[in-house]
Amino acid sequence: MASELKALESERNRLWAAARLRGLPVGTPERDRIAELDSLIRELRAAKAQ
C-alpha cells in the first residue's frame, strides 16, 4: 500500500509540475488526472489510517 501511495504521489507531482510549467487551465486531461489522483491518494490515506 505504501509503494502504491508513493507511486500515485509521484505521478501527481510530475503532472502538477508540467501543468504549472505549461500553464494548463482547469479542464485539461492533465488537470483532470491530477484531481483523480488527489481522490485516490485521499482514499488510500484514509484506508491506511483505519
Image: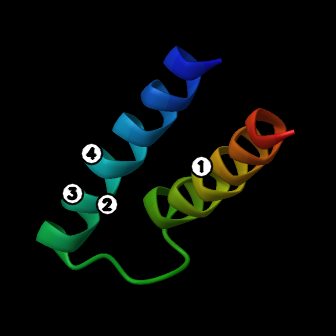
Q: Earlier in the sequence, mark 2 or mark 1?
A: 2
Kindly indicate whether the residue at mark 3 contacts the one at mark 2 (C-beta within 8 angstroms).
yes
**What residue is shown with label 4?**
14
Front position in the image: 46 or 16: 46
- Kind of residue at badge 3: Ala
Residue 23 quadrant:
bottom left
Q: How many marks?
A: 4
Q: Secondary structure at mark 4?
A: helix
Above or below for 3 versus 39? above
Name the image quarter holding the C terminus.
top right
Kindly indicate whether the residue at mark 1 contacts the one at mark 2 (C-beta within 8 angstroms).
no
Residue 18 quadrant:
bottom left
Residue at image coords 56%, 53%: 33
Q: CA distance from mark 2 to mark 1?
A: 11 Å
Residue at image coords 55%, 77%: 27
* Rendered location of residue 22, percent (x, y): 16, 70
Q: CA distance from mark 4 to mark 1?
A: 12 Å
Q: Is residue 1 left or right of residue 3?
A: right
Q: Is residue 20 left or right of residue 26?
A: left
Q: CA distance from mark 2 to mark 4?
A: 5 Å
Front position in the image: 38 or 21: 38
Choose mark 3 or mark 1, whichever is in front: 1
Front position in the image: 14 or 7: 7
Residue at image coords 49%, 82%: 26
- Kind of residue at badge 4: Arg
**What residue is shown with label 1?**
37
Kindly indicate whether the residue at mark 3 contacts the one at mark 4 (C-beta within 8 angstroms).
yes
**What residue is shown with label 3?**
18
**What residue is shown with label 2?**
16
- Kind of residue at badge 1: Leu
